[in-house]
Structures are given as C-alpha cells and as structure tokens.
Image: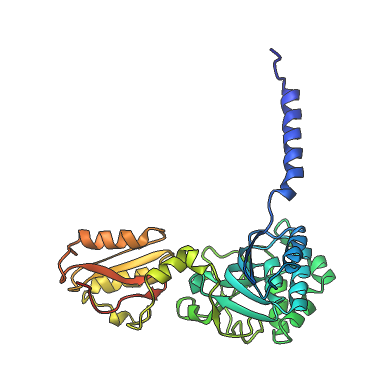
C-alpha cells in the first residue's frame, strides 16, 4: 500500500480545488419553467441563461409574461442583455418574492412591470444597487455600464436621478434600495427603504425613503398579479386554503375577538414576528395562541390554543384569526 505524503495530499487538494473551480460555473443557472405563455425564472443568473431564455422565446406559444422569483442576481452582463431582450419583445415582468441586483435589470426590462401576491408583501421586493467585486463597490464597472442612464431609461424616465445615484453608490453588496408593494408601509414605516448592508435587521433598521415603486417607475401599475403556479407555492396554498376576509386588517388590533390585555400584547408581538406565522383564538374569546417562523405554524397555533382550553364544543373551539399577513377570521365558528 502506498502511503500518502504531505506533498501528495497537498497536490491532491489543489487538484480537487481546481476541479471545483472549473465545475462551479456550470453547476448553477437560473431555473427556467414554462407555464403556457409565462416563463418563470428563479435562482442565480449566469451567462448561458441568455441562450436558454432566447430558446424559450423562439417556441410557441409566444411568451407574454416573465416571472422573476427569488433571485439575488448574478452575472451583470446577462442581466443587462435579458432586460433589453424583454423590452424589445414587449414582455410584462412580474416580481415573485425577491429580485435583487442583476435580477432587477431583468425586471426593469419589462414594458409592463408588476408585483405579485405569490409571497406575502413583506417578502416581495425589487432590490437595486451598483456593481461589486468581492462584495465591494466597483465604480469602474458602474461607469462602464452607465448604470445611471440605463436605469433612468428603463424606468421610463421616472426614477429620481439623485436617488439612483445613491443606490448605485452603495459601498457594500449586501446593501440595496428596496421597493416593496404599498401594503408593507404599515409594517416597515415606508414601502421603500435604503439599506447600507451594515444593519443587523433589514429592512426595519434601514433608512425610510418617502417614495414608491410606482412613482419611481419601478412598477407601471398597482395591479397585483398572481402567477399561474401560485397555488402550488407554500404561501399561495395557505392563501387559498385560508382566504383573506373583510373582518379586519392586521393593523386593527381592537378587532381581535379576545378581550384580554395579554392577548393584545401577544398579537402585537405576532405582527412583528417572522413568517410563516399564524394566530388562533377560541370562539368564546377565552383562549388564544400563536406560532411564527415555522412552516407548520397553522397546526402549531391551533394545537397550542386547544391545549390552553380551546376544546371541541362550539363555544370553545379554536379557529384561525390571522395567517401570515392576513386576517382570515370570519367572526363565526362552524358547527
């Protein structure tokens, strides 16, 4: 048996590292899903994604909508080219979850640009910043690509140049200007925030900017779109199974059907808690419970409420009051 020497081990490690470096560029790309006339793109953007998307555009039926789902960006050159392709083809782009960095250029390429309800509003945003090398701002790349003028052009001349200059000059890649749907203003204070990337809690600790995605030309309409596959997504499934009611909004804490100061306190904590989340109450207003940051939060909240005395009789049975960012309580308990 040959014994591996330190030199051999070091050489082997270098070979493995080089192999990984060679393989890495081919290991990831955007996931491309076609749903009739809609193309769903998610994940990291790489150069070969341009060819993959162009191939889909050459197929029938004709693509009319491109959904951009949970992408933190990637190759900037490809981002520009895909955004320009979408504008040339007259595509409607839709943000589903987050769309940041190079992905934002794909989004701005849409002739019509919309938010979706595939994810809760606080998880739905478009994030803009500059170009970066190893996490630090690359001013030369920003100037070479004329990111300021490109952004002004693709927001149809509506973006405030001073604000664009601020976001393309953010020093850290972790920072960005985030445009959320209007519904989050009650939770975050504004629907637009500027994050430097140094905040421990984002976007709550970010600078609040008194403008909107519509005013800046980031979106072209306040219409909220539902992707063809939204019902198959975790939050979409929760929304379909437990639809929003007209009983109240989350901000109307006085509507909570539990007359207890501790319940009011817990509901306040619930409203600030991470998603997925659920808040349950009993019919007689005596019991309540909640769960957050848990995909099983609905079952957990109901089980906790029942354990506290919310039994199976009509008067004590526990039902859901709120799910994620929506009130789902009807005010009536089913027999």
**Relative depth, front residue between 133 and 40:** 40
Q: What residue sits 72% from the left and 72% below the top?
A: 168
**Where does the image place residue 300, in percent across and percent down from the top left?**
32, 58
Q: How is the image coloured?
A: rainbow
Of residues 69 and 256, the one drawn nearer to the viewer in this rendering:
69
Residue in the foreground of this view, choosing between 164 and 44? 44
Q: Is residue 290 above or below residue 1?
A: below
Residue 161 to residue 17: above or below: below
Q: Is residue 205 visible?
A: no
Q: Is residue 280 above or below residue 156?
A: above
x and y percentages locating residue 53 in the rendered image: 73, 64
Residue drawn 32% across and 79% down? 253
Quarter of the image that includes the C terminus:
bottom left
Quadrant of the image occupied by residue 213: bottom right
Which quadrant, please, contains the N terminus? top right
Q: Residue furthest front?
A: 60
Question: Residue 15 falls in which quadrant of the image?
Answer: top right
Q: Residue furthest right?
A: 144
Q: Is residue 304 visible?
A: yes
- 280 left or right, relative to 292: left
Q: Where residue 225 appears, x then y in whole percent?
A: 55, 78
Q: Is residue 30 left or right of residue 186?
A: right
Image-quadrant location for residue 210: bottom right
Q: Position of residue 78 (x, y in %)?
A: 77, 64
Query: How many numbered discs sit on the rendered protein?
Result: 0
């Amino acid at each position: 048996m040959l014994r591996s020497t330190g030199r051999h081990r070091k050489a082997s490690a270098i070979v493995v590292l080089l192999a990984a470096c060679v393989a890495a560029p081919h290991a990831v790309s955007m996931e491309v899903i076609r749903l009739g006339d809609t193309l769903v793109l998610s994940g990291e953007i790489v150069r070969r994604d341009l060819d993959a998307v162009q191939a889909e555009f050459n197929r029938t039926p004709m693509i009319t909508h491109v959904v951009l789902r949970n992408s933190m960006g990637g190759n900037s050159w490809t981002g520009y080219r895909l955004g320009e392709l979408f504008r040339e083809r007259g595509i409607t782009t839709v943000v589903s979850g987050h769309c940041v960095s190079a992905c934002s250029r794909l989004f701005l390429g849409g002739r019509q640009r919309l938010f979706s309800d595939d994810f809760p509003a606080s998880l739905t945003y478009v994030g803009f910043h500059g170009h970066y090398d190893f996490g630090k701002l690359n001013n030369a790349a920003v100037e070479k690509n004329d990111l300021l003028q490109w952004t002004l052009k693709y927001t149809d001349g509506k973006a405030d140049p001073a604000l664009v200059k601020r976001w393309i000059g953010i020093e850290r890649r972790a920072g960005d200007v985030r445009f959320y749907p209007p519904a989050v203003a009650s939770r975050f204070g504004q629907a637009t925030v500027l994050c430097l990337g140094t905040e421990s809690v984002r976007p709550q600790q970010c600078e609040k900017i008194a403008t909107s995605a519509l005013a800046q030309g980031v979106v072209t309409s306040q219409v909220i779109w539902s992707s063809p596959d939204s019902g198959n997504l975790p939050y979409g499934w929760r929304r379909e199974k437990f639809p929003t009611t007209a009983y109240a909004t989350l901000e109307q804490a006085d509507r909570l059907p539990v007359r207890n100061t501790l319940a009011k306190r817990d509901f306040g904590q619930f409203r600030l808690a991470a998603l997925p989340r659920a808040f349950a109450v009993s019919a007689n207003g005596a019991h309540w419970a909640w769960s957050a940051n848990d995909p099983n939060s609905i079952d957990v909240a109901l089980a906790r409420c029942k354990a506290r005395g919310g039994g199976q009789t009509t008067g004590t049975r526990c039902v859901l009051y709120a799910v994620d960012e929506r009130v789902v309580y009807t005010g009536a308990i089913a027999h």
